Amino acid sequence: MNTYVEPSRAIEVREEVDVLVVGGGPSGIMAAYAAAKDKNLKVMLLESRGFLGGNLTIGLPILAYLGPKGNQVIKGEAQHFIDRLKARGAASEHKRCKNHMSLTIIDSEAAKDVCIEMMQEAGVEVLMYAFCCGAIKEGEQVKGVIIESKCGRQAIMAKTVIDCTGDGDVAFRAGVECHKGDADGGMQPPTLMYQMRGVEMQKLRDAIVQHPDIYDMDVMPPEQFVSGMFITVGLRNQIRQAQAEGLDIPVSRTILITGLQPDEIWVNMTRVSGTDSTEPSSYTRGEIKAREQMKVVNEYLRKYVPGFANAHVEKVAPFMGIRESRVIVGKYVLTAEDILAMKPFEDRICVAGYPVDIHHSTGGDCTMLFTADAYDIPYRVLVPEKVEGLLVAGRCSSMSHEAMAGTRVMSTCMALGEAAGTAARVALQDGVLPSEVDVRKVQEELLANEVYLG
């Protein structure tokens, strides 16, 4: 491999802050908002795109605000976010779902607005269009990050950094041990979501409810589709028929999600195996392939699924939804065994209810492992094993491949973000490192903000 030695140079320190949150997705928004509750702290949020919200903006519903027993397990700022959206008619209620525990439909454009409004309200300084391209360390402690933008290379110094990039970008550059995928490196494939309008919803409902032998829905009962919003996970018969007749469908199940409008469906059926979001050429190939798959999926829907004969594509998500990439090794690595046994943790900072939902790295199917009740997530998964001054929240927290398949959904990521921001704030107030924070104080702060801890 050819190499180039970059000349050494002094770079401008753009900002000096107390808390720097890198990544403005579901976990990052909550982390920044929670950290900024102390108005004496200077909090900054760094985002590489030109909008905030991350996966909140790509047409996905938010899953599992409710747990397996139907009670609400994700509350706190994650619920307050929904309350803000509902106030402008941009979010639904939490509807129970046998497969996904619950689904909450949101308007993706309104989500962008609410994220910005939250940051402005909290006094968080937002910087978009800038990439984190390096970590600044003294010994084993992170002291800030290096960014790259149209201004060139600059530094942002911070007393505490929270990595909410989803890909563990800061942690990786800071030398935190990271892993990707299963034992063979296989990662859950990403999906490019897109919205269709002109769907005759009643035809789709009637087919599922009246002919479940033909229009199968895996484990979900037909009565779930009589009224209200829904997710379909099934129609395997239709996919097999289409494949037999020559259509190269990339998935084994038809996953369709109602929107807030009566003729609106979001399609979750592109799937590009082998895509690595931490490698730009792989990510680029994935985006191109997904758009090719859209054409085939649309042909399938119009020919084989009731209600889609006259439907059209209205808009496509601005980027692929990544299910899996890097995860860190933290003070504790949460496992699927912990989740399935509903292992209690004294240092829990989040209670989650989504099942272990592994989209296979090859092929088009999925394995789901359900729990009888919600499960604890400990604070230690946010704390790198060795590197100090850094917290890692979201799907790149310290989880095994199988455990991350349950904790990767947005509701849980928002809860982890709020916990990380709260812990950063409490640690700075007490003059200790995040790894040394009194978790009981963090729990008290979370409970005071209506977070559910069991």
Image: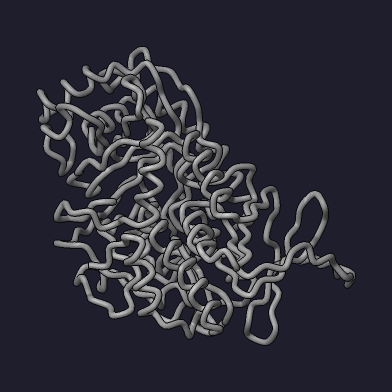
Q: Where's the N terminus, which quadrant?
A: bottom right
129 in relation to 215, above or below? below
Q: Would you place residue 27 above or below residue 398 in this image?
A: above
Q: Residue furthest top?
A: 310
Q: Nearer the viewer, residue 177 or 445?
A: 445
Asked whether residue 360 is in view, the answer is no
Q: Residue at x 46, y 36 (%)?
A: 108
Q: Quadrant of the C terminus?
A: bottom left
What residue is rendered at 41% in x and 47% in y? 81
Q: Nearer the viewer, residue 280 or 224?
A: 224
Instruction: In the displayed orientation, state which residue is furthest to the front.
Output: 40
Percent position of residue 359, x then y: 35, 52
Looking at the picture, the colour scheme in use is one colour
- Which residue: 80% across, 60% down? 153
Left or right of 451 on screen, residue 50: right
Q: Which sits in the foreground, 113 or 61?
A: 113
Query: Residue 405: x percent and y percent?
Result: 35, 59
The answer to which image quadrant residue 377 occupies is bottom left
Q: Position of residue 120 (x, y in %)?
A: 58, 48
| Position in image of residue 124 (x %, y %) | 60, 56
On screen, residue 262 versus residue 296, left or right, reads left
Judge whether residue 197 can be spotted in this image.
yes
Query: Going 36% across and 48% down the picture, which residue do you hit?
Result: 363
Residue 318 placement, left or right of 267:
right
How many numbered circles are shown?
0
Above or below, 20 relative to 86: below
Quarter where residue 344 is shown: bottom left
